Amino acid sequence: MSVTLEHHLNQLVKHGHSGLLTQLQHGIEKEGLRVDRQGRLAQTPHPRSLGSTLTHSQITTDYSEALLEFITPVFQRPDLMLQHLEDLHRFSYAKLDQELIWCASMPCNIFSEEEIPIAEYGNSNIGRLKHIYRVGLQHRYGKMMQTIAGIHYNFSLPEQLWPAWQDISGNRDSMTSFRSASYFTLIRNFRRYSWLLLYLFGASPALSSSFLQGRPHQLDTLNEDTLYLPWATSLRMSDLGYSNRAQSALNICFNQLGSYTESLQQAIQTPHPQYERLGVKVNGNYQQLNSNILQIENEYYSDIRPKRVAESGEKPIHALRERGIQYVEVRNTDINPLLPVGISLEQAHFMDAFLVTCLYCNDAIISDAECALLSENHNRIVNRGREPGLTLLSDEGEIAREALGAKILQQVDMTAQLLDQASGTQHYRQAVAAQQTKLENSSMTPSSQVLASLQASGASHHEWTLALSKQHKDEIMATRLAPELLQQMTCEANASLLEQSSIEDNDTMDFDTFLAQFNAQ
């Protein structure tokens, strides 16, 4: 790995292209439940003053009407990206009256799925499709799993880098093919090394017991209302979180774009007996978009996705096949409840160095045997990642977590040096050094700090998170939005409402036909 990485980085420097790495592109999608002052899930509709969840590009909802999602524009500078994320919180808090944004990945106390309202997107065809997709998720997996929140870190290389890198590589494929193949190299290596991100940034070692009400589990009891595992890093990313039994038999190939889209397309087109029994349209009401293993490709849960912005009504898989990969979406990032917006600038700098490393190191294909090994490492880390003496699997057999992590960090540090040289900073190497400290001392990890704070408080997970949510709101609201930004965000919210009305007014096709055409893509 190191020879390949060092060679590739040196080639960038030799040909005068390393400066392009100062133009990395980033964006963040961050979810958060709306709750009332007691921490109960909000039963109120999405505030109109925040705009339309269908058409607003930056403030929308995910599964539930109460599950806010903030989407930053694309930024070159990660500090500006995080500042904008904070401003989205600031603008939204001003419109939420007394409601709070839950500051943890695992949800507040929810004692019945009846408390969880499914998101509404109006009565246009596309709005109805988005709602029915979520109704399908309810029938397939239950509502509770969909209340988990996370941070998605969107990342791409600058467009100017691709022709330069293709020339250095001596590649003669089309630019679309070359770019997509390169992003799949990044994705494969991310899957190899992402266990380290879960160790370094996992922040969900405990949860409210109501989340698992009536379900068997292997968790320990911290107090009457709180379950945990003493060495866990990210229960959100364990089988308790985004687990999906119907998908367990899927063999989605992450080795190249063609096989990836083909295997996903097959899942979208393959009927599933249980979902066929449920029915698609029952007594005039849609229960799901179709009765196949996946309704759409976004239903497949993975910790990283190749992405391309799709047109309205276009399936993401169609956009990928037609125009190739535009960016990657890293999906395994917990919300750190100890931080006001759940993620820090240091973490963003490390993510950049980590992802560039994944692009330029080992380009080997992942075999079925390696895939099983990676899955086992993932399970060990999420459930007992801080356990003293923990070993992980490698092609050399069992190896200590610290030793395997140090190998990865050594490579990331090499990339960080180049990023610092190119940008005239020390941010990237400092970020790597901070992670090395966590690797050597697990008490420095967010999961350990969350657990220590929770235990010291004597409170339940619900009470502890509620107090932090109030604290973060006060901290964010202590600074006012700049007047011009407030005006801009207000205009965007109002414009999105007008856009939704226009879409609804101009729908001429009946929904049955619209859905049939969508499913036929």
Image (cartoon, rainbow, N blue to C red):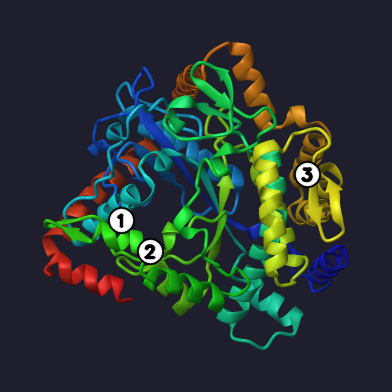
Task: Between residue 429 and residue 80, name the one nearer to us.
Answer: 429
- Say if 67 sits above or below 7 in the image: above
How many C-alpha atoms fall within 10 Å of the one at disc 2: few (<14), some, or many (≥20)? many
Q: Earlier in the sequence, mark 2 or mark 3?
A: 2
Q: CA distance from mark 2 to mark 3?
A: 37 Å
Determine whether the residue tagged by mark 3 lies in a helix, strand or loop: helix
Residue, x 30% and y 40% (percent of image)? 65
Residue lying at 33% horizontally and 36% vertically, measured from the top left: 66
- Kindly indicate whether the residue at mark 1 contacts the one at mark 2 (C-beta within 8 angstroms): yes
Q: Amino acid at mark 3?
A: Val
Of the image marks 3 and 1, the number of the one nearer the N terminus: 1
Q: Is 162 in front, or is 279?
A: 279
The amino acid type of the residue labelled 2 equals: Ile
Which of the numbered marks, if any, corresponds to residue 432? 3
Label placed on residue 133 = 1
Which image quarter: residue 179? Answer: bottom right
Q: Residue at x 72, y 47 (%)?
A: 196
Residues under numbered marks 3 and 1 in contact, where contact means CB atoms less than 8 Å apart: no
Tell me the element at label 2: loop
- Residue to which mark 2 is pinned: 296
Callout 1 amino acid: Tyr
Q: Which mark is residue 12?
A: none
Where is residue 213 drawn, in percent x and y? 42, 29
Between disc 3 and disc 1, the foreground one is: 1
